[in-house]
Image (spheres, rainbow, N blue to C red):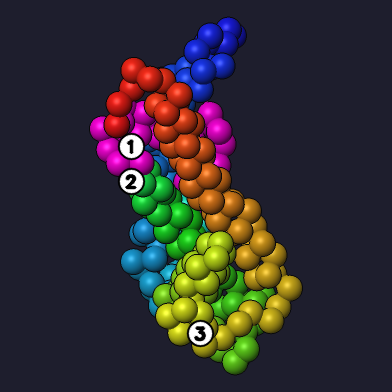
Amino acid sequence: MTIDRDASKGEQPPPSRRALRTVVALTFLCPAPAGMVFLMGSDRIAQLPLRLQWPLVVIAFLGATSMSVAIALPVLRRAWLVMVGHETRRRPDFLPLLLSLWPATFTSVGFALLSEFLQEQGVGASDPSGAPSQSGALAYYVWHFLDAIPYLEIPRTVGWELGFTYVDHVNPVLLLVYKLVVITPVLALGFTLWRERSFTHGQQSADPGTGS
């Protein structure tokens, strides 16, 4: 595989069609099970036989989590930026970062479904006791997502406090995985966009024939 000569100038070769198809599948097909399970609600899920509950929740979790792959892996991240129009410069630079909330949201739903289900099965525990609802578990992950944004401290700024915390040994591990597969890729995407924008502005400043 050859490297584009323009790579040294900040330009990268376009992603392959396979990468683009993979990103489309990850973005639009993988969240379907998580969305279905979330809309069904924990009460309807509990009415199913236990041998069906486990695979249903696990499939929803894995499907939702796989969405983060679209912005986590560099080769797919480039394809994802092309898909949302960033590479053609037809959309503002901040829009890809805003659109990254789509996979981040559904991945958060997948983690919330698993945390709520594990506590229903007696694997997880919270303080105060009692299993939080699916929306409560989702708020738990969204809170940590917003809290991870550097310098802003959004939850504390708006006075948002969680009404519970997990006190078992499973959910803290899930939260760590969540930070690795959801929060870190979104922050990395923001850094990538900032770096590309700085490079472009630097080129325009250095090129006397480029006007603003």
The numbered dot on residue 170 is none
Residue identified by numbered label 3: 161
76, 60: nearer the viewer? 76
Query: What amino acid is at disc 1?
Result: Val
Marks 2 and 1 close (CB-CB < 8 Å): yes
The one nearer the camera, 35 or 83, is: 83
Quadrant of the image occupied by residue 34 = bottom left
Magenta segment: does it hold 209?
Answer: no
Measure how far apart labels 2 and 3 are at the Cα level: 29 Å
Residue 150 lies, in percent from the top left, at 56, 62
Q: Distance between the residues labelled 2 and 1?
A: 8 Å
Q: In this view, does 138 lie to the left or right of 92?
A: right
Which residue does the image show at 56% across and 78% down from the upper left?
120
Magenta span includes 82: yes
Disc 2 or 1, which lies upstream in sequence? 1
78 or 11: nearer the viewer: 11
In the picture, the disc for residue 84 is 1
Secondary structure beneath label 2: helix
Part of the protein shown in magenta: 65-93
Q: Name the residue under label 2.
A: 95
When asked about the image quadrant of residue 127, the answer is bottom right
